[in-house]
Each structure stands twice: as structure tokens, then as C-alpha cells.
Amino acid sequence: MNLAARINKVYPTVRPYSIQIDRVSDRVYNANFLKQKIEKGEIAETFRARSFVTFPSFKKRKFVLYGTFTHVYQKESLRNTESLSPTYPQFRDRRDVETHDLTLSINTVYKDSLFGKTAVFTSALMLNSRNFKSVEKLRGLFTATLVLKANQRTIITAGLIALIDPTANLPFTPLFTYWHRLPKQWQLDFVLPSRLYLRHPLHAGWFSVGTELSTVHGFKTPDQSILKGDYEISNILLQSGVNLEYPVRDGLLLGFRTGVECMLAYRMVKLNGKSSDYVSNAKADPTAFASLSLAYVPGLKRNKKR
């Protein structure tokens, strides 16, 4: 881990405080309800804001304890909607859909050795809510990672992610990372299952091209009489494009990213129900997006050239 920190200290992969704003262009969508085609229309004026804060940590030898707080807000306007089912009433021609996801996470990191190699074990207890008043969902996350190779040119790790979440269809997911220094200062940064980037220093900042997987969660209490109780919305997104980042001053990193956003899966599930038992799902056409971010990274220096 110390070697990885030295190699990657020029590019800040760890950002304890950040905010990101996304704007997504219009796209056509089709929605199903209880396995029936129910609606089609246009998603317009998508606005998404993500903020992330890390709380001070407690460290003792090989053990670290820290907290994080994440807020994801998304607002979309649906227009030109058309009903595809005679069973359900016609929706309004234009309406707004808003979701909030507040996540408080208590995290631990433990370093040790296994089979003669560095091993890292992490855990997270995540409390999810749509407001600050009550906890609507409780999840757990565990990872075990083994450093297979680490030198000045290549870092390879492999491990396993265990997710304690009744909604998840796959409780276990493989974890694999590969960082490699390429010719002419290019770097390959691959993390399965979340991102793949090619990165290059650019004046005082960095240029990256690649793709990244993310999930937008939210909670909803539908106003339709056929749906009772609370539901969870899960939107899996794949954003591919270019990323420009520049340290505007010591400790502050400004980023701009643009490209194509694809909606891989959109589902509404009964709260704490299985993802496969969704009551509603939707598909949408790929569309353009633009993202602006600002992160505070302690120790980041605004050098003239990297």
C-alpha cells in the first residue's frame, strides 16, 4: 500500500471531500409495470448532484476506523408521456421525479499478510435514508484483497466483495485491480467491476479517457393505490468519455468530464425486497452528459508541470 501511495501520489485516487454535478441531455425511454408495457416518453432536464465527506479517522497500528457521508440527489422531468396499457390510467403529460439517497457509513480497514503477501480487509456498515429523520435501509459490505504484485511499473490486486443486502442478487462479487505504467507517461487504471481508464499528465493536471460504472439509489412512496408502502429505486449507469482535471490551488482539484451515458438497468423494488422481484423497470436510449466536480485533497500541490 505504501508503494501504491508513492506511485500514485501525483494523481489523487483518494479524495476525502468532493462534490459532483451532472447534467444529462434528453433521451427517449420505455417503462414496464408488473411485467407489462405501461408508458413511453422522454426524460428531459436530468440534474444529478453527488457529495462525499470523510470523517476523521482513528488509527492504531494495522487498524483504521473512519466514517463517510454521501448524498445523491437526482431530478428528472418526464414529458410527452404516452400510456401503453389500458389497465392503468394515463399519466400526466409532464411531471418531475426526484430522489434522495443519504448514506452514513462506518468503515474499517485492517492490513496484514497472507501467503507471504500484503492483505487488506475492509468492512462498512451503511445506513441509507431519504431524509435525516429515519434509517430506511441497513446494508453491510466486506472486502478481502491480496496484493499479487507491486513495483514501480505494475500493481495487481485480487479479492472478493461480500454484500449483505436483501436487494442484491449476487451477494459475492470478484474484485480485481490492475495499474500499469505505459510508454510516454501513459497509465492504465483498471478496477473490476467499476472503471477502466487511460490517463496521462497534461500540463499541471491530467487527461483521462475511459468508462466508469455507478449506481444512483433513491427511495419512493408511490401515490398509486395499487402500490402500498415504500420502494427503492436503483439506476445503474455507465458513463464513457474524457475527463480533464486541474488543481486550481493547493488541495483543490477541479474536474470536467463529458461523454455518453448509458442506462444499463432501472428498477423499482419493494424496500428490502429482491432486485429480481421488481415491480417496475425502464430502458432509455444512450445520451450525452457533462459533469463538473470539485474535490479537496489534503497534500495536493499545484505544480506548474507534472
Image (spheres, rainbow, N blue to C red):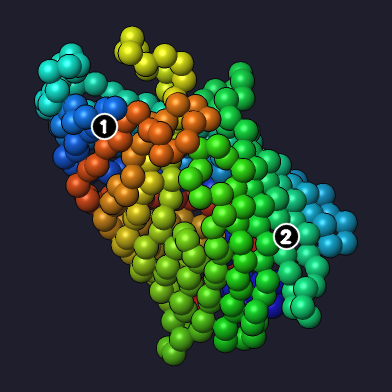
In this view, the residue in front, 16 or 217, is 217
Residue drawn at x 38%, y 46% as measured from the top left? 236
Amino acid identity at mark 1: Lys
Residue 296 position (above or below residue 209)? above
Q: Residue at x 17, y 16 (%)?
A: 87
Image quadrant assignment for residue 155: bottom right
Q: Which badge, 1 or 2, is on the more N-terminal residue?
A: 1
For the N terminus, give its image quadrant: bottom right
Distance from disc 1 to disc 2, alpha carbons, whole Å, reads: 41 Å
Is 6 or 136 nearer to us in this picture? 136
Q: Position of residue 252 (x, y in %)?
A: 55, 55
Is residue 285 toward the left or the right of residue 20 in the image? left
Left or right, 94 with respect to 204, comes to left
Quick check: can you spot residue 181? yes
Which numbered marker is on residue 286?
none
- Single out the mark in the foreground, 1 or 2: 1
Circle 1 sits on which residue? 35
Classify 10 Å Cα crowding around label 1: few (below 14), some (14-19), many (20 and above): few
Q: Amino acid at mark 2?
A: Phe
Q: Residue furthest bottom?
A: 183
Residue 260: x and y, percent?
26, 55
157 on left or right of 201: right
Write down the residue under mark 2: 121
Residue located 62% across and 43% down the image? 164
Q: Nearer the viewer, residue 85 or 189?
A: 85
Relative to 180, say whether 271 is above or below.
Answer: above
Give the total number of marks visible in the rendering.
Answer: 2
- Residue 136 x, y percent position in the rendering: 57, 25
Residue found at the very far top of the displayed protein? 225
- Say which quarter of the image contains residue 97: top left
* Residue drawn at point x = 16 percent, y = 40 percent: 28
Residue 252 visible here:
no
